[in-house]
Image (cartoon, coloured by chain):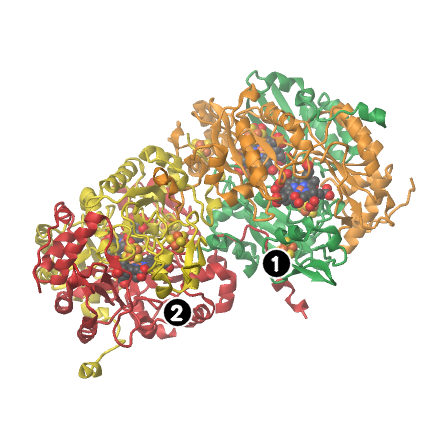
Chain colours: A orange, B red, C yellow, D green
Amino acid sequence: MADQKYETPLLDQLESGEWPSFVKEIKMAAETNQMANSLLGLLEQSYEERKGHWKHGGIVGVMGYGGGVIGRYTDLPEKYPDISHFHTMRVNQPAGWFYTAEALKQICDVWDRYGSGLTNMHGSTGDIILLGTRTENLEPAFNELTKLGFDLGGSGSAVRTPSCCCGMARCEWACYDTMALTYYITMRYQDELHRPAFPYKMKFKMSGCPNDCVASIARADISIIGTWRDEIQINQEEVRNYANNGVDIYKEIVLNCPGKCIEWNGNELKIDDSSCRHCMHCINVMPKALAPGKDRGATILVGSKAPIIEGALLSSVLVPFIKIEEPFDDLEIWELIDNMFDLWCEEGKNRERIGEFIQRVGLGNFIEAVGLPPMPEMIAHPRENPYIFYESFFEEEEE
Amino acid sequence: MADQKYETPLLDQLESGEWPSFVKEIKMAAETNQMANSLLGLLEQSYEERKGHWKHGGIVGVMGYGGGVIGRYTDLPEKYPDISHFHTMRVNQPAGWFYTAEALKQICDVWDRYGSGLTNMHGSTGDIILLGTRTENLEPAFNELTKLGFDLGGSGSAVRTPSCCCGMARCEWACYDTMALTYYITMRYQDELHRPAFPYKMKFKMSGCPNDCVASIARADISIIGTWRDEIQINQEEVRNYANNGVDIYKEIVLNCPGKCIEWNGNELKIDDSSCRHCMHCINVMPKALAPGKDRGATILVGSKAPIIEGALLSSVLVPFIKIEEPFDDLEIWELIDNMFDLWCEEGKNRERIGEFIQRVGLGNFIEAVGLPPMPEMIAHPRENPYIFYESFFEEEEE
Amino acid sequence: MSDQVQQRLTDIGPPHYSKFLPPIIKENYGKWKYHEIPRPGVLVHTAESGAKLYSVRAATPRLLSTNKIRMFAQLAEKYSNGYLRFTSRNNIEFLLTDPNNIDPLIEELTALGHVVGGTGNSISNMVHTQGWIHCHSAATDASGIVKAVMDQLIEHYKNMDLPAKIRIALACCLNMCGAVHCSDIAILGVHTRPPQINRELLPKQCEIPSVVASCPTAAIRPSTWDGKPSVEIDEDRCMYCANCYTVCPSLPLNDPDHDGLSIWVGGKVSNARTEPMFSKLAVPYIPNNPPRWPEVVDAVVNIIDVWRKYAHKHERVGEWINRIGWPKFFKLTGIEFRKEHIDDFKHAGLTYKRSVHLTY
Amino acid sequence: MSDQVQQRLTDIGPPHYSKFLPPIIKENYGKWKYHEIPRPGVLVHTAESGAKLYSVRAATPRLLSTNKIRMFAQLAEKYSNGYLRFTSRNNIEFLLTDPNNIDPLIEELTALGHVVGGTGNSISNMVHTQGWIHCHSAATDASGIVKAVMDQLIEHYKNMDLPAKIRIALACCLNMCGAVHCSDIAILGVHTRPPQINRELLPKQCEIPSVVASCPTAAIRPSTWDGKPSVEIDEDRCMYCANCYTVCPSLPLNDPDHDGLSIWVGGKVSNARTEPMFSKLAVPYIPNNPPRWPEVVDAVVNIIDVWRKYAHKHERVGEWINRIGWPKFFKLTGIEFRKEHIDDFKHAGLTYKRSVHLTY
Ligand code: SRM
Ligand code: SRM
Ligand code: SRM
Ligand code: SRM
Ligand code: SF4
Ligand code: SF4
Ligand code: SF4
Ligand code: SF4
Ligand code: SF4
Ligand code: SF4
Ligand code: SF4
Ligand code: SF4
């Protein structure tokens, strides 16, 4: 390795300040890794020119997989030959992002050997992102990773690496076992994850309760969000403690309850659970006093995504409530999901996310095709326009 | 007149019951008026067959006017020759629908002479609807009406008969003189009202306060709704009286305030007027205690309409606040309205209401073209999508 | 006739309202202080001067004979110095200065068949349209249904016993001349079958390009028939809006066996508390059943009864539903939720439930 | 190599998480009772069994060297029995059982440059994307802006002194890999110029029909150039979304003099209180100004300062704005309201102000 040293006066300015510095990270890696060193030079140039220096990626990967690697080449290969290739490997994280020190060090070993020594912990989808390697290193790095028990995550028009909140591992509000379900889904769809065969990407995200700590409703084609359907558990003694310790229950809780279903008489908190919207707010403010009910499960929503191309979407309700209990094999949702995949694969356009597909064909037609009955929980409100297709009212008549 | 008597067993069933019966009205008129009598027969037939018996109207009217009459012919002229023509005349009501007994009787005289003896008091747009006459009676009826001081209202692609709430005549909340402005607008646009020259209809409706008792925000191309911009006037003594007489100020008022800007300590009501949304609710509940502020005026909104063709629209804010004071000639809004008319006439499509036109060209382009600056009051919220046309940021650069 | 034309007055506009205002209004114009509703149908407005105006409100069927108008005029002469008005919802109001006239006036009005009420938290008169009385486009009648519904709801017109005001409106076709689209409850006449094409008349009566352009779903294509220009309608795309019929008489949609009614709920116009809202579909279809449309009446009464029972004070129908959520609305009213309720027009995607704010 | 392939493992999926869970979690899995935040950056979860788990949260720049990861591993071995995790916002969390280890761990982390905090009503780590580090599509850098912004907001990471949580995110182009569209504050890299067409390469690199189909505003039409298939771009219709560039490398949009940033506010993801909301445009355009993007930093700090000052407790940025109204947001922040703020995309009509709920 040539140890060319780059002047980085602009980047250097990002070493000061209390927030941890990514420049320090690159410099640390650059001490022993020439790819990281070259990245410093290239990045400084980008900062000078206010312009990126990466080319549109080509197709690279490991044998038998259609994804998991993002090909990347600089447009200045002569100047920075060490990063003429700078592919990333997306490594499927363990559910909930829990690690042992041991496991992390093993990954570092692999990446010091085959890559730039730089990572993202983690990518926005959830993967361990190993930043920067050459095409010829992909296969050996992959081999070492799998030997350590790690596999690649998703990219391209495939199931993407599912992710989840820590759920039952470290949260009292988890209404189902997010990590177990995430592992199950990841394993169930290994083939769809590694071999893109869909019209476009397909993301799953699992949150244990309506706080939605993995933002699944905003960025998952299938969002599975924990909830409950019985009464909120109340410990009145603890409610009074909160009140005595400065929580203004009226202002902070009663007035903020979207179901307008809480009453507080200074001594007792009453919740009309039949109007509760399961928003979590009252529980969030008084975690020692309140807890989700005992009849727990999840709501399944579908279709969120970033704005390209028809505008951003939030996921919307498909299954209002379902119990999520082992054995997961027996859950009814797999058939539903299979139906959704089949329909989308058959009728979806290239680069059309399932959410956009639903927008195009209409939710009513979509649920009909995947075998769900219409339910008022699926909508914010019924139609406002009178442009109703009436054929279903007169079906018997048709010859 | 032949005095053929029709059997009306179905209609007869609508004579019983406590709500006033339109069948009784028709029968009353039918005693002396053969058109009304024939209508009974025709209507009974419609009730039997569950089907109307009117044909698509032709163009009929009075000389020099392009509207004010709706032509109507039955599709059973042989059976009901007396109503082979059954046109309606739309007579422009006096602002606020106030009458003297005298004036009403004069109208009745005319309609007994030239029409069916049947009316609608009033049509949905606001006109006095004189139901049912023949083509040859239009001109003489018109002549008599104008002699009485009444003129025709609008129809077709014209300014339609403006209407308003009773406002200052009988309401303590009127923030401007709705009846005076309505009269002024009606007179200002006489030509546009009588001689259709627009792409489609154009309705004005004036309400004195945000309660909007003429539903102007839902059904007027131009909605002028009274409001105020200083402090709500409070009489604390009367507030306490309401509280003592059973108004639960906390539940009924504080919790319902959309600005969340009311506080009540059991003795004094405090309003943070800077957050008040001018919704009227607190005033509505305690009319003796509260009143709109003294700096009164109106908000001008544009574009509401029924669903045909692109879906119903509500009017949206164009001018957040304007004083409406005599002399009305000096108000700045006429220039704005002229600009709007010009633009719409030039670029609007046939049968495109101004609201739909704005939907098509975009509010931003519309206000630019009519000479209004962008104001945050015009929108519910800024754009959510990142699809911004940036040209205005780089205009100097363009060659 | 030419003589007549010479004298012809045009563009005089309506009479100036001031001619019709009683002296008490002229004197206190813009100076009203507050109002009270001492009993249903009676409004008392007190001016800064202390003057009091008593308005007595009574129902009308809107369709009035000149005979009846004369009777009203007589009553006005007798009790309110000849002054009266109509409201934006087709009620009649007598403008009294002498409170002693209230009771006798109400007695006479009642005897005449014009129930007094409609003020405050009541059901006021139903805004409605022409129906089979006058319009070619009607999918149903207007006046008959209003009569049938209001006969049943009469107690709520006469009493102010509801959680809030409730505005019911009816329009006999999708043109919605009653502007019913923002009503607490809207009854809407609907066609449910594509237009029948009158191929003979069409080329004579209609401009093909306007007809094609009139269709919101692009269901109409130009074609030829028997050598003449005509149109073809893609029946799967047609949602029976009748806009093509408005533009072209040769495309009637009226069909007694399939025309009917739909019911919409939760709209409002006022800015009080919440912003104005459109009504939303509750019942997609009820066949026409004159003369008393019992299924329509039942559906409306049911919705009002459920609302009365569960709404908080001041909650309009839409505000109540927004609090309890639509699933509960369907559950409590027992109305079947169908595919037709799920929007499929332009902004449909925004009506899908994009949160887990659900009740169970 | 063939040997290697034979031993090749595929489709093994990720390691099972249970391998990485500390015993205290395994024992109390699904049996946590409540949590407390005794100080910023420290969460204490108490199980039904009474067991207590102490999580110490520290910032990371997300872009980590293997060196640093090893240091973290070492700290974990020293203080948390080797157990640690990362959060959904790229913070690191050490999972302690011994409360005595909290202080020394925090000290070491701080010394290492990893500030502790981000819990409760604080500003947590900024979700962000690749920027000039790795992506061809970037209109701006990611890591540099995050560093500059967070340096300025550090006190709000370290303290829980805000009305509510605030989530800031950054994406370097409209693809929005950070899914920033539902953030309290989103910083979004924007191109502001139409693609430059590389007419030589285009026919080789790209499928014309896909390119044409990729454009949401139908700005791209097929054409020919020099006898070769090409495309034409209607520049008046282009709003610089770069979707065509994603599909076709011959249509780059990157342009140092015009690329820049926009700022969006008021989104949220949680269902707490209000339903999830999209972020809305606050500042349409700020030019790129590396290395510290002072105008972006100022704009973000300003919004946060105004929010801090006026919001009620528990009010996320969007909830606060919904209460006070957008006109007041623009007034209080001093941000200029421009035509660009008025939506002109698909559902624009629904964003017009359809009520008189205004403040003055
Ligand atoms: C690495 C990552 C950003 C990061 O720094 O974290 C990333 C990077 C890229 N994304 Fe992404 N996306 C990443 C998470 C996301 C997310 C967030 C999420 O998954 O939760 C989104 C928004 C949610 C969504 O899926 O809609 C996202 C929405 C996009 C889109 C727009 C998709 C859409 O339907 O609107 C594109 C464009 C495309 O697919 O062609 C895109 C495309 C890309 C590409 C492949 C660029 C391209 O046009 O081909 C980027 C490669 C950058 C590089 O050189 O490494 N990326 N991308 C994230 C994946 C890491 C991981 O696997 O953990
Ligand atoms: C008489 C009246 C209904 C009534 O019984 O009160 C009425 C009757 C007709 N309206 Fe209307 N409209 C009447 C008020 C309305 C209103 C309410 C309003 O003005 O406040 C609306 C909804 C608000 C709006 O303007 O959007 C209304 C929306 C329509 C439409 C749909 C317009 C649209 O842009 O969506 C049509 C269709 C058309 O214009 O071709 C229409 C068309 C018609 C026609 C002319 C039928 C036609 O297709 O040519 C009807 C003639 C019926 C007849 O034979 O008498 N009428 N029409 C109302 C006028 C009386 C008056 O002058 O006072
Ligand atoms: C007479 C009339 C105006 C006119 O010039 O004709 C009128 C008169 C009054 N309205 Fe109204 N409103 C009248 C139609 C309306 C309409 C329009 C409509 O119904 O088509 C609305 C909007 C309805 C809607 O939102 O859908 C309307 C929404 C209100 C409200 C707001 C109610 C709410 O909570 O949403 C108030 C305030 C209140 O009653 O507390 C109000 C209050 C009033 C007051 C109390 C105003 C006053 O101080 O005099 C008047 C007596 C109300 C009553 O009946 O109890 N008026 N009012 C209209 C009577 C119609 C009728 O015969 O029933
Ligand atoms: C660790 C983490 C989950 C994980 O598996 O990684 C997590 C953990 C907790 N979240 Fe969260 N949330 C985490 C990301 C999120 C996200 C997603 C995001 O930010 O991208 C959200 C949605 C944000 C949004 O709405 O835009 C989120 C919305 C919440 C809320 C709702 C806050 C609200 O009022 O809107 C709560 C409740 C609360 O804090 O009162 C919550 C509460 C909690 C609790 C208190 C749950 C518990 O009992 O353990 C945890 C500690 C919170 C804290 O930091 O004070 N968590 N939480 C994530 C930490 C991210 C970070 O490093 O800062
Ligand atoms: S989503 Fe709910 S269950 Fe999951 S970590 Fe957040 S608060 Fe806990
Ligand atoms: S969870 Fe939300 S909706 Fe339910 S009672 Fe608590 S605050 Fe109200
Ligand atoms: S709109 Fe306002 S001013 Fe006019 S009558 Fe109704 S309450 Fe009075
Ligand atoms: S008018 Fe409406 S917003 Fe204003 S203080 Fe009264 S209730 Fe609140
Ligand atoms: S609603 Fe339709 S049918 Fe009824 S009057 Fe209006 S146009 Fe005619
Ligand atoms: S009724 Fe409406 S949808 Fe059907 S063809 Fe005519 S215009 Fe088109
Ligand atoms: S947001 Fe755009 S520029 Fe940034 S990583 Fe994603 S695709 Fe690349
Ligand atoms: S940048 Fe977007 S809008 Fe512009 S041409 Fe390309 S795809 Fe179309």
Image height check: is B95 above or below B47?
below
Residue type for callout 1: Ala
Residue D219 is marked as 1
Horizontal and vertical percent position of residue C246: 34, 59
Q: Quadrant of the N terminus of chain B?
A: bottom left
SS at mark 1? loop
Q: Residues within 10 Å of mark 2 (few under 14, many from 20)?
A: many
State how many labels appear: 2
Question: What residue do we see at 26% from left, 53% from top?
Answer: C127
C231 relative to A133 in the view: left or right: left
**B298 or C57, nearer to the observer:** C57
Q: Which residue is mark 2?
A: B198
Chain name for mark 2 = B
| Residues at discs 1 and 2 in contact (Cβ within 8 Å) | no
Question: What residue do we see at 39% from left, 30% from top?
Answer: A274
Q: Visible in this render: residue D242?
A: no
Image height check: is C197 above or below D71?
below
Question: What residue do we see at 36% from left, 53% from top?
Answer: C195
Horizontal and vertical percent position of residue A113: 84, 32
Measured in 3D between alpha carbons, the distance from the residue under mark 1 to the one under mark 2, in whole angstroms, is 32 Å
Residue D71 is marked as none
Disc 1, ligand 12: is the CB inside 8 Å? Answer: yes
Horizontal and vertical percent position of residue A66: 71, 35
Residue type for callout 2: Phe
**B11 or A294, nearer to the observer:** B11
Image height check: is C236 above or below D97?
below
**C244 or D9, nearer to the observer:** C244
SS at mark 2? loop
Image height check: is A264 above or below D82?
below
